[in-house]
Amino acid sequence: MSYSAELSYFSRVLEKIRVRTRTFRLNAPLEQQVEHDLRPLLESGNLPSLQKLSPDWIRPNTIYKLTDPFFCQYAVLLLPDAEEELLVVGPYLLQEISRNRLLEQAEAIGIPAGLFSSLETRFASIPVLRDTSAFFALLTSLGELLWGGDSAFSIVDMEQDVFTAFDPRAACSGEDPEDALRHVRDMEARYEFENKLLDTVANGLPHRAEFMMRNFSMLAMEQRVPDPLRNTKNYVIVCNTLMRKAAERGGVHPIHLDRISSGFARKVESLGTPEEGMELIVKMTQTYCRLVRHHATMQYSPLVQKVIAVIDTDLTCELNLHALALLHNINSSYLSTLFRKETGKTLTEYITTARLDAAAKLLKTTSLQIQTVAQHCGISDVNYFSKLFRRHFGIAPKQFREQNYAFLPKRT
């Protein structure tokens, strides 16, 4: 093998953190290749046999991430030019497993009580990798060496037990053909709905999105785990990611997407019921739609997009025609003409509007002093700020806050 030195180095590094590497030959009886003390455990109760680790699902140029019934993690890959020789990396754990949890899992799987002591002894030797970033960086580097670059292979998370793989034909095993066909059609309908919703977000259509979500049932969520709340949280996380990408496709700059996406991500774990999760998805959909409507810049040239991104990033920095032209190494007159042609506003008008809109939001949602609000929006002179604000909104900042700040004590 031309990569034997690299493979040896890979194994030696993992040995330092007690993660084992072993090779199996797929054309040999696999149970004969396993240590004697492990074999009774694999053959007991409902724990799958190593015989099921077959070439039927192992593909070349692929690293498989697997989990066994005892929460142990593995990485499996078919070595190139090795006549179906399989490299198995692991086991390792992502967190400590208590003895009681191990007892409960052994009972669920059907491991005889007499074998538990042996299982517990083996479990004590399994390393715990709470941070797997370095491990997967090393694994990815091995893949690049074996197959010639990061685009030459893929990593697949099987989400199944370590010695079996998902067979799509087994998903409807035992079902009536009509039930199986109904199952397929239901799945197609769910994906069609999600794609339409993402298109709605990408086009910034909050009213259409609200209409769609009113007709969405929690039963349409894919039930990946038994716990309804955990299942809902997982779905909300997926929706947040998909809608963020849809809004990006709609022309929203990452500086806005990251702030909104991070805010929703922080709210997920505080959800108390599946119903709260649905409410968050509805709010998420409307927020991303509004983000596209107000911050999409796809219709502008790349230069104008960059200028707008700088303005939106920090309103307190020096924002004027000369500074922005110098920053982008272009002629001030050219930038002024181009910006007005594409946005319909002069650069100064656009910056002023952005600052005053930001000020209005702060006045609505915080109790900051008006002078502090002005400073956060890049206007140091509070009198000049008040003059601009009144001209833009037709009302002074103080009166604007009294009319719009929900937590301001009401006058009697």
Image (cartoon, grey):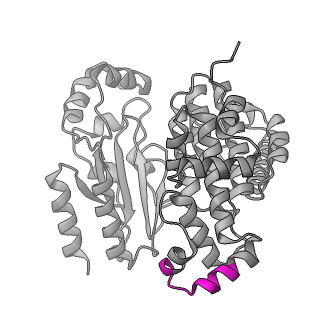
195 lies left or right of 150: right
The segment highlighted magenta reads: 326-338
Residue sitting at 59 percent across and 40 percent down?
362
298 lies left or right of 208: left
Residue sitting at 53 percent across and 74 percent down?
324
Q: Measured from the top left, where is residue 160 in percent x and y?
A: 49, 44
- Residue 11, quarter of the rendered image: bottom left
Query: Observer-nearest residue: 60 or 374?
Result: 374
Quadrant location of the C terminus?
A: top right
Asked whether residue 84 is drawn in magenta, I would say no
- Residue 61, quarter of the rendered image: bottom left
Query: Observer-nearest residue: 32 or 294?
Result: 294
Q: Can residue 289 be seen in this view?
A: no
Residue sitting at 35 percent across and 77 percent down?
81
Q: Measured from the top left, where is residue 304 in percent x and y?
A: 64, 75
Asked whether residue 330 is drawn in magenta, I would say yes
Quadrant location of the N terminus?
A: bottom left
